[in-house]
């Protein structure tokens, strides 16, 4: 398997029009409904003269990635009117946590622009059913990290959805991600606006 990302689409339940709920559980983990998040609890904007520079936190790599996705979509659009009616699955394979975060956000941004898909919830693969944490040493046979995410949302409807910031790219500049001495994960992400 080469380094990169795979994206698939699934419909909400069998009917294709039922919304997912915050209590929805699958082997991938618990669905994180972003409408319940307060931005200041999961990310903050750092000073930067031209672009959007963010610091994101989480208690595991899985939660860090879910929070980073929230930060991206929270800056792209007002999320209060978005419904989780279908999902897009992204699988990322990378050499280190920072590349996992960058590839994940880059793929989400591609889906946003090419398919006009606006996410409002995420479910990140969590191999441990007891803790729900994705350990940093979860690797494939070639020593690369693997992460799988379901992004729940819908196609942009200009009548209901307010777009905010035009984000052009997720850059490598000043990119970092990893656990701190307190066990909490953090990432710095520079978004080209």
Image (cartoon, rainbow, N blue to C red):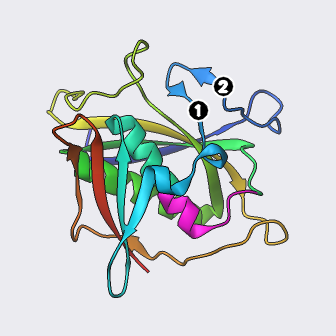
* Alpha carbon separation for disc pair 2 and 1: 6 Å
Using the image as rendered, state which of residue 33 and residue 94 is in the foreground.
33
Quarter holding the N terminus is top left
Q: Residue at x 19, y 45 (%)?
A: 96
For the view shown, which residue lies furthest in the bottom direction? Answer: 49
Q: Residue at x 28, y 60 (%)?
A: 188
Q: Residue at x 71, y 32 (%)?
A: 21
Compared to 8, does 81 lie above or below? below
Q: Is residue 74 magenta?
A: yes
Please give the residue where the numbered disc 1 appears in the rendered image.
31
Q: Is residue 72 magenta?
A: yes
Please give the residue where the numbered disc 2 appears in the rendered image.
24
Image position of 118 (left or right of 166): right
The span picked out in magenta is 71-80
Compared to 126, does 37 lie above or below? below
Mark 2 and 1 residues: CB-CB less than 8 Å, in contact?
A: yes
Task: From the top left corner, tell me how far across and down residue 42 is, in percent.
Answer: 45, 50
Task: From the top left corner, tell me how far across and down residue 103 is, in percent.
Answer: 34, 54
* Label 2 Cα neighbours within 10 Å, binned few <14 / some 14-19 / many ≥20: few
Q: Residue at x 33, y 51 (%)?
A: 101
Task: From the top left corner, tell me how far across and down residue 139 is, in percent.
Answer: 22, 29
Task: From the top left corner, tell me how far across and down residue 155 is, in percent.
Answer: 72, 58
């Amino acid at each position: 398997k080469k380094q990169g990302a795979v994206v698939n689409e699934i419909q909400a339940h069998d009917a294709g029009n039922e919304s997912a709920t915050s209590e929805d559980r699958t082997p991938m983990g618990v669905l994180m409904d972003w409408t319940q998040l307060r931005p200041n609890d999961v990310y903050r904007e750092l000073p930067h003269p031209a672009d959007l520079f963010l610091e994101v936190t989480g208690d595991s790599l899985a939660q860090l990635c879910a929070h980073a996705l929230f930060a991206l979509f929270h800056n792209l659009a007002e999320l209060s009117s978005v419904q989780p009616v279908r999902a897009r699955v992204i699988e990322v394979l990378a050499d280190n946590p920072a590349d996992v975060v960058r590839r994940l956000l880059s793929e989400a941004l591609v889906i946003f622009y090419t398919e006009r898909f606006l996410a409002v919830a995420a479910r990140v693969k969590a191999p441990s059913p007891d803790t729900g944490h994705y350990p940093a040493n979860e690797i494939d046979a070639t020593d690369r990290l693997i992460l799988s995410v379901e992004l729940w949302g819908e196609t942009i409807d200009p009548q209901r959805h307010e777009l905010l910031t035009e984000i052009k790219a997720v850059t490598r500049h000043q990119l970092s991600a990893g656990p701190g001495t307190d066990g909490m994960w953090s990432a710095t992400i520079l978004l080209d606006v």
